Amino acid sequence: MFVLAAIAVLGLLIVVHELGHFLAARLQGIRVNRFSIGFGPVLLKYQGPETEYALRALPLGGYVGFPDDDPDTTIPKDDPDLLKNRPILDRAIVISAGVIANVIFSYVILLLMVALAGVPDVKPGILIPSLAPQADSPANRAGLKAGDVILAVNGQDLADVEQLRKAIEVSKNQSVDLTIQRPTQTIQVKVTPDAKGKIGVSLSPNQNAERRPVKDIGEIFSATSTGFQRIVGLTFESFRQLFSGQAGFDQVAGPVGIVALTANAAQTDFFALFYIASLISFNLAIINILPLPALDGGQLAFLAIEALRGKPLPARFQDAVMQTGLVLLLGLGLFLIFKDSVTLLVNGGSMTPP
């Protein structure tokens, strides 16, 4: 059941993204002839008056097709309602609408979660749920324990996880003073982060699993904004670590890994589905805006070049770049599916080692 719910979440996020492109085009009167979820062989198909709607076998994304790219279309090439004949701004709106839809949807999901489930009962400090298994990690050497609550770093009270993470990262190979709360005592601990600014612990807000109802509509929006800011910060921090080499490629998950992580989280707290869906939706937006072939950002890059040159790049060149990017993207997706599947088999259905 939880796996089906996780698959439904991933599918919904893809639909939202493609629906953004579709609506941005149709609302401007631009012709659309295909709306597809997934790639590869067609599983289900419906032919509308102008648009074919299809569900395909490979759940690695989706696309909105335009008659501009259809060699069999009977629409005249100079039709003003073809996407390629529209001004650059109109085309940019269509291309960026999927990203905008995912960002908005990310916020809306959090809003619904807060309104329906309430807000967590947050207590002071940052919780250490677990430590790295390595005995020589900075945290283990300093005597930190799972369940410890970090109240302050270098004498400063902690407001959120990001504040603590940054304080540790800027103190590479330098001693950091932590105020630790344990069930029977509060102690001071010195820990020295490694050369990467890590101490070998996981961190989370110090809060109860139970939620309390929101007090009023103002708290709904304030709690949603706080949660959304946390997702934005976490996403950009993850990308920074990935591109700087602080995080390895083994920490990147594909569709199978995302479904597994989402299903595992839903088993402990159904409303965790909302938070994870919001996080994935925002991540999809950021990934798609990157200026890479076959992504929305790559098409926006072509539009920017067209605006600077006063004319588009040759269609043959654009098609070659996009097709190469699509092949690489599908290859990456299949590789991640294989990697995540092997991980699940080795770890007994978990994305993390036991």
Image: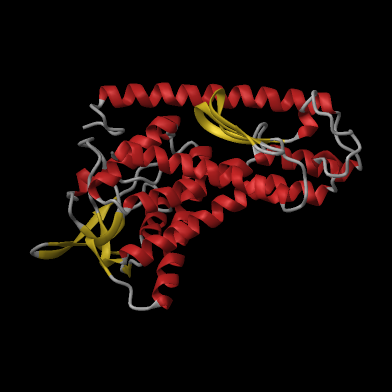
Classify 340 as above or below 106.
Answer: above
Residue 217: quarter of image: bottom left
At horizontal 34% and vertical 64% (from top left) the residue drawn is 116
Quadrant where the N terminus sits is top left
Q: Viewer-proximal residue, 134 or 112? A: 112
* Number of numbered discs on residues: 0
Classify 324 as above or below 48.
Answer: above
Relative image position of residue 297 (x, y in whole percent): 67, 41
Quadrant where the C terminus sits is top left
At horizontal 8% and vertical 64% (from top left) the residue drawn is 184
Determine whether, in the image, residue 78 is placed left or right of residue 56.
right
| Identity of the residue furthest to the front in this view | 49
Determine whether, in the image, residue 7 is placed left or right of residue 153.
right
Residue 134: quarter of image: top left
Classify 66 as above or below 267.
Answer: above
Q: Viewer-proximal residue, 199 or 163? A: 163
Q: Is residue 72 visible?
A: yes
Determine whether, in the image, residue 146 is placed left or right of residue 252.
left
Relative image position of residue 118 (x, y in whole percent): 31, 66
Q: Is residue 201 visible?
A: no
Question: What sort of colour scheme is used for the picture?
Answer: secondary structure
At horizontal 37% and vertical 36% (from top left) the residue drawn is 259
Determine whether, in the image, residue 153 is placed left or right of residue 21.
left
| Identity of the residue furthest to the left in this view | 184
Relative image position of residue 325 (x, y in whole percent): 65, 26
Relative image position of residue 293 (x, y in whole percent): 67, 31
